[in-house]
Image (spheres, grey):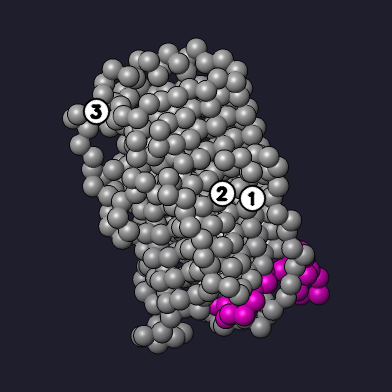
Amino acid sequence: MDVLRFTIIAAAASGLAACGSEPESRDVSGFDRDYQTTLMELLLDAEPGQVIEIPAGQFIIERGLSLADVDGVTIRGAGADETILSFAEQRQGAEGLLVSGSDDFTIENLAIEDTIGDALKITDGENIVIRGVRVEWTNGPSTENGAYAIYPVQSRNVLIENSIAIGASDAGIYVGQSDEIIVRNNIAEYNVAGIEIENSRNADVYGNIARHNTGGVLVFDMPHLPRAGFGTRVFNNEIYENNTDNFGHAGTPVASVPAGTGMLINAGDGIEVFDNVLRNNRTGHVIISSFFSSGWSDVDTTSDYDPYPESIWIGPNVYEGGGGNPDGLELQALRVAMFGPTGRFPPVIWDGYADSAKMVDGAMPERLRICVEEVEVLNADLPNDASEARLDGDNHRCTLDRLAPVDLGPLAGAR
């Protein structure tokens, strides 16, 4: 396998905190306080097909911004380090910018900082492009930060590229309950979850850097939502040193993610993970779990929700370090018991839950199996309180039909 090599477009990296250092809180005393009225009026009066140009500058925004039911709008700044919308003094609104019911929407080349809630939320849209956007809470990781940085939900044909998400108390880049998604060439750091795909269908996540989060890349299927997800490919990403202590709000799904998680698949189906570099994630590089291991809430057994991860292929990846200092006393005890005081978990950890109702002659059908190439797998045997935890790689040597690439047509080719 070729070692991953790619370059994040320079515009996306502008304004990023130095690699390996936590960001410092921004001084907004000299920011422009007058432009916010102009911007609010532009959004309120926006017409289909309009391009709203936000000039270079640093602007205080005290109230949440919104755009609703207007198609074809583009919001364009002068660059992620040139056009800065600061919500550090926000006193009204649940989001920084909320876009709802607007198709063919593009936002690019600007920064959104320090919102009291979600920073950029887009819902119920089709053909959504988020490009060259930096979202950051400048005080560093904190439970007081907004939950989501870049947050499209219930949408179709979504492209997120060359963007940056820093400091979200839930997920930096999150796509939920959506169809046909590409998340590429972004940087996510110092979030609880760097990049998260949840209850979505047909997503390609590639060319990204996920570092210094609690968990680098998450693919979840959650209950109590109107649809299940299927078909996520995570490939050609750098996922490293995701060892930040979990600062999520207690009771939320991500609050149970162990610090040091490279990639976590929870109850997701139809997932491929290949050609990534996973390095120095202290708990584990790839963790595959059922909803029973989430520590969040009980499953409603009367619903159609399927809590088991199935149809998963972990292909060739580069694994370096990691697994030697897992988060939590129970995981530490399991590591020491199985591998000794200086031992490490193998690259892939599975909680051991499988749906016996789907088994045929005591085994899962081929199409539902968890298949892992090349590396060892730890079956943590959590259904039996880890009493028979074991290395189980030979039972995961299988193949699945490959998923098709996501094709967004001209949307993904635009620059």
Q: Earlier in the sequence, mark 3 or mark 1?
A: 3
Q: Which residue is mark 3?
A: 31
Point 50% across, 78% down: residue: 346
| Residue extent of the magenta highlight | 355-383
Q: Quadrant of the N terminus?
A: bottom right
Point 60% across, 20% down: residue: 49
Q: Is residue 193 left or right of residue 71?
A: left
In 3D space, how far apart are the residues under numbered discs 3 and 2 (Cα atoms)?
A: 32 Å
Q: Which residue is mark 2?
A: 183
Q: Secondary structure at mark 3?
A: loop
Point 54% across, 72% down: residue: 3
Give above or below for 48 relative to 192.
above
Mark whose residue sits in front, 3 or 2: 3
Q: Is residue 246 left or right of residue 88?
A: right
Residue 367 magenta = yes
Give above or below for 378 relative to 178.
below
Disc 1 residue crowd, few under 14, some 14–19, many 20+, Cα 10 Å: many
Point 46% across, 84% down: residue: 338
Using the rendered image of the protein, determine whether residue 304 is visible from the camera's viewpoint.
no
Going by the numbered disc 2, the residue's amino acid type is: Val
Give above or below for 110 relative to 172.
above
**Based on the displayed image, in which of its 4 quarters is residue 180 positioned?**
top right
Disc 3 residue crowd, few under 14, some 14–19, many 20+, Cα 10 Å: some
Q: Which residue is mark 1?
A: 203
Mark whose residue sits in front, 2 or 1: 2
Disc 2 residue crowd, few under 14, some 14–19, many 20+, Cα 10 Å: many
In 3D space, how far apart are the residues under numbered discs 2 and 1 (Cα atoms)?
A: 8 Å
